[in-house]
Image (cartoon, coloured by chain):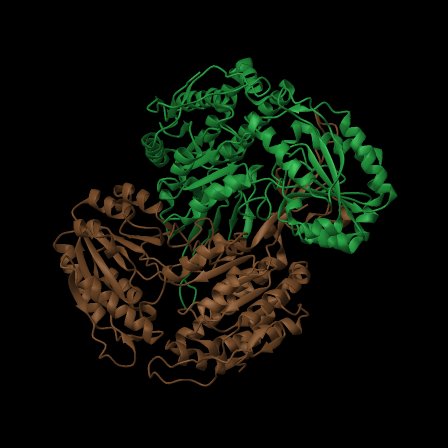
Chain colours: A green, B brown
Amino acid sequence: MIEANIIGFSTSAEGVSYTQGFNPSTGEALDGNFHRATPNEVNRAVDQAGIAYNIYGKVSGKEKAVFLNAIADEIENLGDELIERCCTESGLPKVRIQGERARTTGQLRMFATLVAEGSWLEAVIDTSQPDRAPVPKPDIRRMLVPIGPVVVFAASNFPLAFSTAGGDTASALAGGNPVIIKAHGAHPGTSALVGSAIVKAAQNTGMPDGVFSLLHGSGKVVGQGLINHPGVKAAGFTGSQTAGRILYDIAKQRPEPIPFFAEMGSVNPVILFPSALNSNTVQMLTDSITMGAGQFCTNPGLLLSIKGVNLDQFIIELGESLSQVSPGVMLTEKILKTYNSDAATATSNKEVTVETIVQSENKSNRGGAILVSVSGESFINNPDLAIEIFGPYSMVVKCEDKNQLIEVISNLDGQLTGSVLGTPDESINFSKVIDRLEKKVGRLIFNGVPTGVEVCSSMQHGGPYPAATDVRFSSVGTMSIKRFVRPVAYQSWPDNQLPDELKDDNPLKIWRLVNSELTKI
Amino acid sequence: MIEANIIGFSTSAEGVSYTQGFNPSTGEALDGNFHRATPNEVNRAVDQAGIAYNIYGKVSGKEKAVFLNAIADEIENLGDELIERCCTESGLPKVRIQGERARTTGQLRMFATLVAEGSWLEAVIDTSQPDRAPVPKPDIRRMLVPIGPVVVFAASNFPLAFSTAGGDTASALAGGNPVIIKAHGAHPGTSALVGSAIVKAAQNTGMPDGVFSLLHGSGKVVGQGLINHPGVKAAGFTGSQTAGRILYDIAKQRPEPIPFFAEMGSVNPVILFPSALNSNTVQMLTDSITMGAGQFCTNPGLLLSIKGVNLDQFIIELGESLSQVSPGVMLTEKILKTYNSDAATATSNKEVTVETIVQSENKSNRGGAILVSVSGESFINNPDLAIEIFGPYSMVVKCEDKNQLIEVISNLDGQLTGSVLGTPDESINFSKVIDRLEKKVGRLIFNGVPTGVEVCSSMQHGGPYPAATDVRFSSVGTMSIKRFVRPVAYQSWPDNQLPDELKDDNPLKIWRLVNSELTKI
């Protein structure tokens, strides 16, 4: 395991302070003293990425696909060592981490397929009209090109799928950009293992030195240092609203502001229509609230319904069901501590009724589910109740009627998802509720729970602020590549000097918009 | 002519201070006392836009097309009154304003065609796989939806094509968003006339009250007031870097940051290869530098070449050619004053050689062309020389050799365009120069000048900062609509409640990506 920082194809261990991994369920320190990067190492990583960009930015889609597939292979080649380290560092169970590894390699291969095919580049061609009056029309051709070195902040809650070789990295590399990882302090060993796999893949597939770097260290020196560096051209982040906003502000206040896509979680409102107050919903929500110890950005933290005896009975049943679930180990001691104190603050409100608190015996860093309820009026009057509590916590809001339900939704901040449970007829009856919900979310779900984010072209994982910092992009699925590319137009350019994607005879046989017609010819 | 502010279908004249139009060539005040909007009117315009958004955001593409076409018709119906007012207020000649009107109505009709057809919405469908292991795959469908009320800042230098019914307005309306115009103080009468045409079109085609508003007034009260309003969800701006950055910072520092696309001009480097130092190039550059009195964001302010006797001779010929052009009237007194003082500052540098200053007899607010030269070394050592001087000013940089040319380009900020003039063989010989140039620009031009921005799907009008605040978007062409829309995914949604664009049987017959295949079926 590499304990140094990875700068391109070299390692560097200038720093004399260290990050260690911990087993959250025992508090025990794990092998490895990972050198925190110095400002000099931050600069070197960016400089090397800039050099690599000049080469990697011109690598063909097919060659990038070979590289991305090789990363997936090398991650699999890490075998049980990766799974064990990752489980120990994160406290997440083996089956979850195996699934996450599959998602990670699946994402890499999905992007490989995308860039090998090439139509994603939005090639557009308008041919010349030399005889047009009053002025001739020039030949103009446009496509997407890489934006430049991208910084990726690894996430605590997805040590594989949203970290070193996760979705942000895969989409940035697929787009033709070198990547610099700010490793997450909660899983430095996992980061080092995956980082070494990426370097191996880069070397074996002839990619340039600097296409990938990985730095351990603090948010201040490494994270802010990277975002302040003029050589960095974009960044992806998954984490808390507080940390995300600090970095976003830095990115936007630079002399040259850069795209900074932060996915900062949400409470993911779930609207329960009358017919949905049944045992099937109880089971779905129990699974969704407690999955991964509630540590998903799509965790359903807010359940909205119209008050009544059926809802009261439903709350009792959901509480009983949550009580049956053995509390899961949380990712870090700090996360459990914050969970408990945030929940204590919320439940200390006299308007909030505690329905269920699942005790976790206060050992092994486990976080028990908490279910609370509040009236619609109290929820509307106290904006603090709408703030996300990271963990297996959910709040039922008992609305007076449909109008109050609409008012509750109108008061919500932007969300990753909004779910409605009920019949199609009910959703017509509640269409104004759904209209309002749509304005607040990136993804609408019918008769399903928000957890379980499918990785595909149609996925939208993002949403109005603060779910994400830019509502126009997604951080999951093939479309996430659009965060890290920019269009360039070539006017009257010699055909033999155009990128292959834009040449007259379409040598790559990709879909292109030619004189307003979509064609592969 | 409406002298009040336009708030939806009503007028409002709360303010007791006024904006007037002026004839820049005579200094004479024109008819009309346009009420500067009050903070209360700013709020009312945004509130009305929010109400309209709930309706207009659901209007079909075909209905939006009728509206956009009606705006174009109503602008034409204004006839000579519009042309005359616009010429008088801007100092621009009639043939230019007639051309600009044609561009304005052409843009509106282009967007009408785009949204009537509908494929621009990027509909993506991944159908369900209920039997997939380990978990079933849900049905997910995604498309672009409007972002919400958009503020458009009118530009001084395009009183029609980038103002009240200009490109930003057309793209925002086409995307399904209500628009609020911050009228430009240099052409309030033109704004009022075009604003009344839009209101008429909205009323005649059944669009909601509030789909369009127009406010006169200061950048501070109206401009900043609008950008600070939580009901505003995006903005488009064309103008100076100073004003653009102030507004950008406000947009990004809001509690809920919003997309703010500012196009802030550039010096548009033109690289002259040895073979291009000829009389044909002299004529092209003369036309381009003096077109519209040099008041285009694509004005060629920087000419880069390798030093030598041919370049010296070329500079003499270009200077003589520029001297033959009668200076044009500049848009406002202030713009001429700034042009003269900026040029005086630049030419006071002892490294700068004045090649030609065309005298304008200091009357009729005319700005004469100025051509200066400087060595590559001096240019590199003095970053101030790279700053745009708005007007018919251009600087030749005499580089020692190819390496210094690359260094000069490397030191440039982001640019809207980069042009190369020469033969295809030369451009292979100078490929490293072009590689470097490509990283700095949104559009590359071969053997052409940067002025003359074609309005089409392949156009990229934007570029790395400060050419634009977000390099990923264009402010000209059909793709500019992407600034003002966001994706929404619908998971397991009942077919009959999906937007038509996503329904199973594709009733609109648009192109969609269905299970990774592009199809109209």
Residue B160 vs residue B112, the one in the foreground: B160
Does B217 sit left or right of B132 as displayed?
left
Q: Is residue A502 above or below residue B77?
A: above
Asked where in the image residue B266 lies, by quadrant, the reply is bottom left
Q: Is residue B511 at least partly visible in the picture?
A: no
In the shown orientation, is residue A24 left or right of residue A5?
right
Residue A235 picture location, percent across and down: 46, 39
Q: Is residue B163 above or below residue B511?
A: below
B143, above or below A12, in the image: below
Q: Nearer the viewer, residue A189 or A8?
A: A189
Residue A402, image x, y percentages: 79, 53
Residue farthest toward the left in the current orientation of the protein? B309
Of residues A125 and A441, the one nearer the viewer is A441
- Residue B349 drawn above or below residue A175: below
Q: Residue at x 54, y 36 (%)?
A: A239
Question: Residue B165: x percent and y percent?
Answer: 52, 69
The image position of residue B13, as x and y in percent, is 56, 79
